């Protein structure tokens, strides 16, 4: 979960934890990359588009797709629609505000679609 707004991140992380997922959280793309580079196993990356730092959420999604192709992607933004072609691979766009239950269903769908035998974090 990559989100710079603390309250949004907290509510979303709690919803995913309640649904039974292990959740790693970051407030920036740079923090998310540190987590991935540490070797953490990540099945689905959920990131906001607008974040502080050198890289926004779409840039993060592109880099994650290149370096960790098994990681499924969900991109969110309250600043308008993102084109499907802007999200790498078979990633999804979820407009803010979103229902937490919708996010949980989307995470479940994407986690289930991971390629078998391919480590998510590597």
Image (cartoon, rainbow, N blue to C red):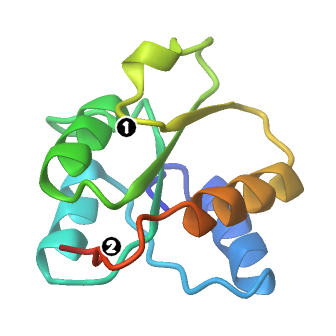
6 displayed left or right of 20? left
Query: Residue 62, how many percent across, how many down?
Result: 24, 36
Between 85 and 30, the one nearer to me in the picture:
85
Which quarter of the figure has residue 53? top left
Q: Is residue 51 visible?
A: yes
Label 2: which secondary element: loop
Q: Measure the C-alpha gap from mark 1 to mark 2.
A: 24 Å
Q: How crowded is mark 1: few (under 14 residues within 10 Å), some or many (20 or more)?
A: some
Closer to the eye: label 1 or 2:
2
Q: Is residue 52 visible?
A: no
5 displayed left or right of 18? left
- Residue 88 - label: none
- Write down the residue under mark 2: 120
Upstream in the sequence, badge 1 or badge 2?
1
Q: Which residue is drawn at 31% across and 52% down?
A: 28
- Write down the residue under mark 1: 51
Q: Residue at x 18, y 55 (%)?
A: 30
Tell me if residue 17 comes above or below residue 112 in the rendering.
below
Tell me if residue 82 comes above or below residue 69 in the rendering.
above
Q: How crowded is mark 2: few (under 14 residues within 10 Å), some or many (20 or more)?
A: many
Query: Residue 117, how many percent across, how many down?
Result: 33, 79
Quadrant where the C terminus sits is bottom left
Q: Residue at x 70, y 74 (%)?
A: 16
Label 1: which secondary element: loop
**Seen from this angle, which residue lies furthest front?**
116
């Amino acid at each position: 979960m990559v989100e710079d707004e603390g309250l949004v991140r907290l509510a979303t992380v709690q919803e995913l934890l309640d649904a039974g997922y292990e959740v790693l959280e970051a407030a920036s793309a740079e923090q998310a990359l540190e987590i991935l580079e540490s070797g953490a196993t990540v099945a689905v990356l959920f990131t906001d588009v607008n974040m502080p730092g050198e890289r926004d959420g779409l840039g993060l999604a592109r880099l994650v797709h290149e370096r960790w192709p098994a990681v499924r992607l969900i991109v969110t933004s309250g600043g308008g629609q993102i084109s499907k072609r802007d999200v790498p691979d078979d990633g999804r766009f979820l407009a803010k505000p979103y229902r937490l239950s919708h996010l949980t269903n989307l995470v479940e769908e994407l986690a289930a679609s991971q390629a078998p035998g391919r480590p998510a974090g590597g």
